[in-house]
Image: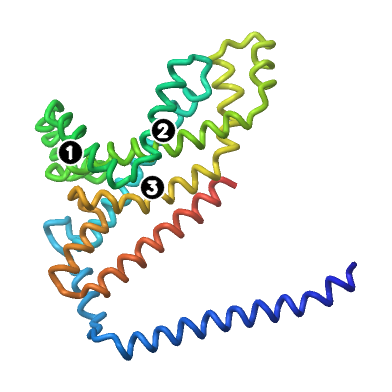
Amino acid sequence: MSHSTLSLSPRIRLFDGLTLAAICGGVVWLSLRALNDFNYEWDWARAWTFISTPNDAYNGLSYFAFSIVNTLKIAMWVTLFSGIIGLFSGLARTSRFHTLRILSTTYVGIIRNIPPLVSVFIFYFFIVAQLTPLLPLDTIRSWLSEGSLRQSILAEPTLFENMFSGIIALSIIEGAFITEIVRGGVQAIPKGQSEAGKSLGLSSTQTLIHIILPQLLKIIRLPLGNSTVSILKNTAILSLISVQDLTFAAQEMANSSGLVFEIWIFTAAIYLGLCISLDQSLQRLLR
């Protein structure tokens, strides 16, 4: 067995090397072909100056950096709200109450079978836009304007309405997917665990808190981590309802400067760095 393994190992390594060489060669060939035939004058220095110039209107940050901060804030709040929605909805899907199961199943079925972009437009224009006038937005804006810490955690007073609408819309969308994660986690817990809680004299609530939830969080921790990274990427959808996130800022800067490829490549690199950093941090935390 060991002799067979050793004899096959060089062949596998050779195949991997040839495959990697072919892929790299193809990428280099396509890149050179594109550079020769591509009628575009690259100006990375001007693009960097354009995205890194500080602006007093954004607390000394550049517009690009300000949009990155907004993206992180949106992702943080969406993760929190969608996690709460998904937890309660997922528990409702496995509840013994038929009404709760119907409501949760309907919610998940509708959201999961409609494109996220369409859902954002529906929530923003038809639902959230009708709800926000009922809220005391003037009071909230004045409360935000009283402290820089509040603005750092939430939003600038002038941007609060759009950010609030986008966060609510995206939280409802992402909550449906987290619902399925929670449902799968609950179903993975043996039924004997609940019966053991009852045999110990625990109520249904105590069984849920002390027995089910600790095991549930252990089971779903990795899918929830992946969902958090997905939420960070999906914040880009909110740029279409004028939320000043990274994608919205990149679109405005690319249009105004004419540096379309440079700005969008910088933007892709920022998203890549943020998502990889978040993924690595979550993996270390979840271990």
257 relative position to 87: left or right: left
Q: Quadrant of the N terminus?
A: bottom right
- Compared to 255, does 83 lie above or below? above
x, y (%) of residue 207?
A: 59, 17
- Nearer the N terminus, badge 1 or badge 3? 1
Q: Secondary structure at mark 3?
A: helix
63 relative position to 271: left or right: left
- Nearer the N terminus, badge 2 or badge 1? 2
Q: Residues within 10 Å of mark 1 (few under 14, many from 20)?
A: few
x, y (%) of residue 139?
A: 12, 30
Identity of the amino acid at label 1? Phe
**Residues at marks 1 and 3, CA–CA distance in whole angstroms:** 21 Å
Q: Residue furthest top?
A: 201
Asked if disc 1 and disc 3 are in contact, CB closer than 8 Å, the reply is no
According to the picture, the residue beneath numbered tag 1 turns out to be: 125
Residue 264 numbered tag? none
Identity of the amino acid at label 2? Val
Q: Secondary structure at mark 2?
A: helix
**Residues at marks 2 and 1, CA–CA distance in whole angstroms:** 21 Å
According to the picture, the residue beneath numbered tag 3 turns out to be: 231
Q: Residues within 10 Å of mark 3 (few under 14, many from 20)?
A: many
**Which mark's residue is nearer the viewer, 2 or 3?**
2
According to the picture, the residue beneath numbered tag 2 turns out to be: 108
Number of residue marks = 3
**Residues at marks 2 and 3, CA–CA distance in whole angstroms:** 17 Å
**Which mark's residue is nearer the viewer, 1 or 3?**
1
x, y (%) of residue 65?
A: 25, 61
Residue at the (12%, 59%) spot, across then down: 56
Identity of the amino acid at label 3? Ile
Residue at the (25%, 83%) spot, across then down: 42
Foreground residue among 254 and 70: 254
